[in-house]
């Protein structure tokens, strides 16, 4: 539906005579295209702007390799920088801090982002890959059948869920989960929360209270990978109010360009730990910055092409 | 944002120049309108005004007018036909708000004196049926279910039979969330439509695509593919009570011209409002502030 970056830049640089180095004017023209490509990939405007400024500096004056076009060269610079920002300095994104049992993991996010599904996927992963005993608890007192949903998923993956006691508040359930996890010797207890808007005062206060009660080792913000410009609001507000330790991007099995990944990274400075790639319980993978970078630019092949040249 | 686009606060009138237009474009982009639609809207707004001195109030108003112009023709409530049962199929990507919207709509139709039957066509997701049953109770509407994992198309067929036998005015069919690039799941949806048409060639009379307001430019692909596969007849946008502005609706209206029936503004049963283009445009451009 949208042009990819190399097509855009191809058009720009075709009009230019080839020179030994990328001059300022060429770079400025190219950066407008980069900005547009990022915006079409749903990178938030402020994030796109900062990113372009950073790349502009790197690109200006850089010598153009003989065997590639200036367009390809710019794509490579942009791609490299994207990977750098997306990866951060986190050596192992998929690792979770779950030593000193029972380790609480708090799952937060907007309505329908994929928290409950991701809670169960993570529990399954911890159980199968790391041999952890996991307890899952639903603190969702809002959505109809939310607790039943987590219960059914628990049964499917063979992970225990905290028994449902109707009428309890989220904080009461969190306390009970902590107690149960301690008494019964679980390694990890996962707290799935109700979806909430980042501007919903009551519900944001509720999740703060849950955090204060349980002191989570990980607080994971679950974000729809198809999110547009609103990603900055979500990232800023949740991080400011609850303090997140990492991000999971869901629905990356869709054909969205995934610009929210860059926005999340840039705004929170926290690692993207996993991506959700489907509804099934094993559709969860560690985050690969290079894949998402290629996707944001709507391409991937040209980079290896430049690399070989 | 507009104030910033206008420059200094103590300069109430400024010449509408390229710099201002660029800032306005950015304002629209941050509302998810997309680059090309934002360009178009800004350019149309500037026509005949470029180079004139304007206040930020003026500019907000002009922009909102321009947006309203695009949205006005598509702002239409879901049509009610004399057909019994009128079949309403509800489709969309995962988590967009389909099930909740069915609950809200069923309640509104009940309040309008219609008899409604709901079919729990999401036989896939854990507790999807239980969720819909709660909504059925809240709305005072019976919910037809089938066991988890069973064929949603046969449930739709049975639901048609029952709705006909009971003389229901409306049959609302929930479906599992599916991403539009999943060919297998889209084929499953196409099959539901085919089976419904065996019963009534004119059905589904309405196919509602439910979009999440936080979704960015992928909504364009959602509309394109769901329309192709399931003949979408109208849109509902949910979660407009949050910080997302849902500007992609403007791009959608511009490109597809599908009616926008309603908007979701919360999780409660009454949180479904008619789509008001003027109000939407004002919220989007910031003209509603102050
Ligand atoms: N395609 C796809 N669907 C997903 C993914 N993750 C979750 N889903 C689906 O998205 C929908 C919503 O997921 P939930 O886990 O219920 O989301 P939630 O955040 O718990 O929702 P609330 O509790 O209502 O706020 C369900 O249909 C899930 O099956 C993913 O990675 N890919
Ligand atoms: N704030 C807000 N939340 C909404 C709105 N509409 C739905 N939701 C919430 O969004 C989440 C997902 O809604 P569902 O109705 O389950 O979405 P769905 O499309 O049926 O999801 P799947 O069947 O899993 O694909 C729930 O937590 C709802 O309460 C709305 O207009 N505003
Ligand atoms: Mg949930
Ligand atoms: Mg549903």
Image (cartoon, coloured by chain):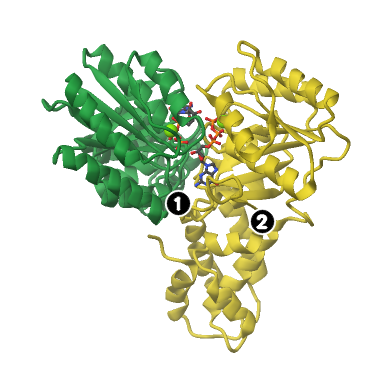
Chain colours: A yellow, B green
Q: Quadrant of residue B248?
A: top left
Q: Nearer the viewer, residue A278 or A14?
A: A278
Give the number of the disc on residue A86. Answer: 2
Instruction: Kindly identify the residue that appears in the image at 77 percent across and 54 percent down.
Output: A90
For the residues marked 2 and 1, what is the alpha-carbon distance in whole angstroms? 31 Å
Is A38 situated left or right of B38 in this image?
Answer: right
Q: Quadrant of the C terminus of chain A?
A: bottom right
- Residue B89 visible to an observer of this rendering: yes
Q: Which residue lies under the disc numbered 1?
A: B19
Q: Mark 1 near ligand 2 (CB under 8 Å)?
A: no
SS at badge 2: helix
Q: Which is more foreground, mark 2 or mark 1?
A: 2
Q: Quadrant of residue B31?
A: top left
Chain letter of disc 2? A
Q: Is residue B105 above or below residue B238?
A: above
Q: Is residue B158 above or below residue A23?
A: above
């Amino acid at each position: 539906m949208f042009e990819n970056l190399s097509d855009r830049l191809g058009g720009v640089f075709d009009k230019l005579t080839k020179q030994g180095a990328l001059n300022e004017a060429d770079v400025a023209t190219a950066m407008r295209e980069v900005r547009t490509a990022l915006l079409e990939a749903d990178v938030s405007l402020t994030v796109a702007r900062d990113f372009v400024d950073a790349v502009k500096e790197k690109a200006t004056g850089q010598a153009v390799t003989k065997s590639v076009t200036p367009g390809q060269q710019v794509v490579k610079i942009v791609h490299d920088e994207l990977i750098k920002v997306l990866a951060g300095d986190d050596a192992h994104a998929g690792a979770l801090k779950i030593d000193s049992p029972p380790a609480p993991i708090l799952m937060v996010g907007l309505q329908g982002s994929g928290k409950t599904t991701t809670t169960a996927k993570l529990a399954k992963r911890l159980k199968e890959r790391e041999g952890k005993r996991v307890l899952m608890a639903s603190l969702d007192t809002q959505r109809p059948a939310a607790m039943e949903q987590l219960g059914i998923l628990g049964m499917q993956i063979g992970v225990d869920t905290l028994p449902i006691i109707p009428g309890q508040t989220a904080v009461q359930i969190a306390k009970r989960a902590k107690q149960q996890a301690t008494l019964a010797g679980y390694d990890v207890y996962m707290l799935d929360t109700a979806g909430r808007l980042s501007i919903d005062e009551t519900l944001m206060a509720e999740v703060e209270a849950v955090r204060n009660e349980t002191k989570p080792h990980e607080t994971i913000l679950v974000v729809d990978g198809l999110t547009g410009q609103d990603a900055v609001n979500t990232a800023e507000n949740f991080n400011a109010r609850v303090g997140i330790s990492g991000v999971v991007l869901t629905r990356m099995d869709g054909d969205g360009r995934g610009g929210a990944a860059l926005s999340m990274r840039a705004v929170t400075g926290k690692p993207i730990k996993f991506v959700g790639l489907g509804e099934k319980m094993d559709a969860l993978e560690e985050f690969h910055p290079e894949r998402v970078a290629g996707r944001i630019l709507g391409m991937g092949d040209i980079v290896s092409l430049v690399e070989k040249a | 944002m507009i104030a910033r686009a206008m420059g200094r606060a103590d300069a109430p009138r400024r010449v509408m120049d390229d710099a201002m237009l660029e800032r306005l474009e950015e304002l629209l982009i941050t509302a998810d309108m997309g680059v090309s639609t934002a360009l178009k809207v800004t350019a149309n707004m500037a026509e005949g005004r470029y180079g004139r001195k304007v206040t930020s109030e003026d500019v907000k108003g002009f922009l909102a007018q321009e947006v309203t112009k695009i949205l006005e023709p598509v702002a239409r409530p879901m049509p009610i036909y004399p057909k019994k049962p009128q079949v309403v199929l509800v489709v969309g990507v995962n988590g967009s708000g389909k099930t909740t919207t069915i609950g809200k709509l069923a309640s509104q139709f009940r309040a309008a004196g219609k008899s409604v039957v709901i079919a729990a066509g999401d036989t896939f997701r854990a507790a999807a049926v239980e969720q819909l049953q709660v909504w059925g109770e809240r709305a005072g509407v019976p919910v037809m279910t089938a066991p988890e994992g069973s064929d949603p198309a046969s449930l739709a067929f049975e639901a048609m039979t029952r709705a006909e036998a009971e003389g229901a005015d409306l049959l609302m069919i929930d479906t599992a969330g599916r991403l539009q690039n999943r060919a297998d799941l889209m084929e499953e949806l196409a099959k539901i439509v085919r089976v419904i048409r065996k019963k009534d060639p004119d059905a589904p009379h309405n196919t509602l695509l439910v979009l999440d307001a936080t979704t960015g430019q992928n909504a364009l692909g959602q509309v394109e593919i769901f329309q192709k596969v399931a003949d979408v007849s109208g849109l509902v946008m949910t979660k407009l009570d949050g910080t997302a502005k849902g500007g992609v609706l403007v791009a959608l209206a511009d490109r597809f011209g599908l009616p926008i029936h309603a908007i979701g503004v919360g999780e409660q049963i009454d949180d479904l409002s008619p789509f008001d283009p003027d109000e939407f445009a004002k919220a989007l451009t910031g003209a509603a502030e102050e």
